[in-house]
Image (spheres, helix red, strand yellow):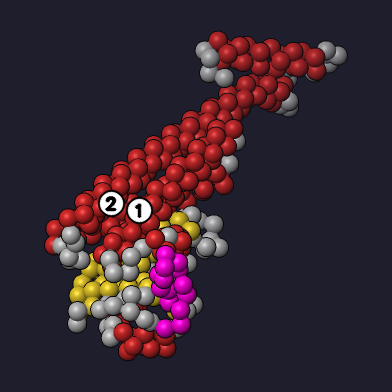
Amino acid sequence: MIQYFKNINQQTVKIDSAENGAWINVLPPLKQEEFTQLSEQLSIPIDFLTDSLDIDERTRFEEEDNVRLIVIKTPVENNSFNDSDAFYITIPICIILTHNQIVTVNSFENPAIKKFLNTFQNRHPDKRNMMVLKVFEKVVQDFMAHLKEINQRRNIIEQKLYIANRNEHLLQLMRIQKSLVYFVTALRSNELLFMKLERTNFLGLNEDEKEYLEDLIVDNSQALEMANIYTNILSSTLDAFASIIANNQNEVLKRLAVITIVLTFPVLIASLFGMNVPSGFEHSSYAFYIVAFLSFFASIVVGWYFLRKKIF
């Protein structure tokens, strides 16, 4: 689906065709015919439009026939039905600068583009570089918001895990860890992209726009640092819970071993007196009570020994 927007008198107006100064947003469902039509209409290389279909597309920028392409990673919620998949993944946004328009291509519904649409009435279509930087800003803000949400979710799951050691809580922590891996990888690649854009001045930024890009690099670095910190905290937490679970298992096994040893002596005594050999108690009416007393006494002595050694 292709959407056309234009800023008229500080209002976002949806139009029917690609006019000069328009913002063109391509979003799912994606059709090859629409890509071909848009490519021919705006003289955009077809590869620039289809690159966003690859979820593993790397961040980069390039220019062909005076049409510039920038690919940046942004976070989205994972709608997978697999319970072991990450809560969040990262997908590419393709930003294409033609002679008179800006084109964004998304393979998923994208919160960053929605935020940009909500503020599009404040944009100046003639300042296309600033519009691109604003898209970058929304992407960085999305990363920050999702990282805070991930940290809150991690804290809640940890509290539940302290109360009840359940596998589903560990599985949720693992899904959070996978999400953080996606975030760290994407933020690191975005940081390299921003720094390369600053160094090469691929967009032809003026001094104010360069300062704005520098601020975005700082914000992205902060998000990357947050993601690394949360990743380290989560890894330490999982290691600690793994040690706790192992210790608990050892305690249970130790108690079971002690109980087995305590019960072994009564079984041994009963087995000795149950043999078909003379024992001196064959004709005694107190034989059962004697055996029961010896078994009980042996159990008490062995149990007291283990309690004294603090093994039980």
Q: Is residue 62 above or below residue 261?
A: below
Q: Amino acid at mark 2?
A: Leu
Crowding around mark 1 (Cα neighbors within 10 Å: few <14, some 14 to 19, many 20+) is many
For image coordinates 28% across by 57% down, the residue present is 190
Q: Which residue is mark 2?
A: 216
**Of 137 and 228, the residue lying toward us:** 137
For image coordinates 34% across by 55% down, the residue present is 137
Crowding around mark 2 (Cα neighbors within 10 Å: few <14, some 14 to 19, many 20+) is many
Residue 279 percent location from the top left of the image: 72, 17
| Left or right: 245, with 43 as reference point | right
Q: Which residues are magenta?
A: 4-17
Residue 67 percent location from the top left of the image: 23, 78
Q: Which residue reaches farthest left? A: 200
Q: Disc 2 vs disc 1: Cβ atoms closer than 8 Å?
A: yes
Asked which secondary structure carries label 2, the reply is helix
Q: Main secondary structure of the magenta part?
A: strand
**Of 16 and 298, the residue lying toward us:** 16
Q: Quadrant of residue 59?
A: bottom left
